[in-house]
Amino acid sequence: MSLSPLPRFLLLGAALYFSQWGLERWGVWSDRPVITLRAGDVAQLRQEWLRETGRQPAPRELEASLRSRIDEEILLREAKVLGLDRSDPVARDRMIRNLRFAFPERRDSDAVLLDHAIALGMPERDMVVRRRLIQRMEQRIAEGLSVDDKQLQEYVARHPERYGAGL
């Protein structure tokens, strides 16, 4: 028994659709970027919290730290998409100076050194560059925001678990 072309086409389309859906659901394949926090990242956040406060973080505090780390990663990725790792003078100069210090014998141009720094992952690994790019993205976001006091108070009142009780 042979199916006509239309049912064959519909079955094939459905099979492809559900295959893609399944692969995305299980994290095998997705068009969306994935941010992965490993056990070492969580341990590092715990250590930072302990160093800063003298105690281990409560589950909600750790969760807030994890959310903050994810937000920073999103901002950093977006900064790179916008080319801020190349165009921001502070980040750019820092990366070039670091490579000139690390390789004083190299006489490459700034552009070549910048390409090399980016290829080495300095926007992600150098804490000064990373922080600068995140701050630039935060500034861009803040420039487009305007909230009146009443809206802000209503929002805080709706989220007491996030901003503390009694506000």
Image (tube, grey):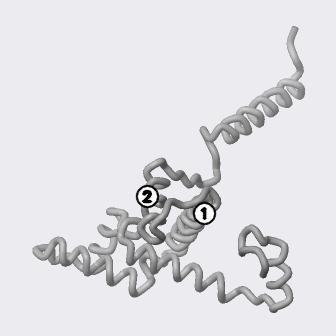
Q: Residue at x 81, y 32 (%)?
A: 14
Residue type at the position of mark 1: Glu
Q: Observer-nearest residue: 143 or 113?
A: 143
Which corner quadrant of the image does residue 160 belong to? bottom right
Local crowd at mark 1 within 10 Å, few (<14), some, or many (≥20)? few
Task: Name, please, the residue furthest toward the left.
Answer: 105
Residue 75's spot in the image, x, y percent? 56, 71
Horizontal placement of 90 versus 63: left or right?
Answer: left
Quadrant where the image shows the N terminus: top right
Q: Observer-nearest residue: 137 or 110?
A: 137
Q: Disc 2 designates what residue?
A: 44
Residue type at the position of mark 2: Gln
Local crowd at mark 2 within 10 Å, few (<14), some, or many (≥20)? few
Residue 134's spot in the image, x, y percent? 51, 76
Q: Disc 1 designates what residue?
A: 61
Which corner quadrant of the image does residue 99 belong to? bottom left
Residue 59's spot in the image, x, y percent? 61, 56
Q: Residue at x 77, y 34 (%)?
A: 18
Quadrant where the image shows the C terminus: bottom right
Horizontal placement of 82 versus 162: left or right?
Answer: left
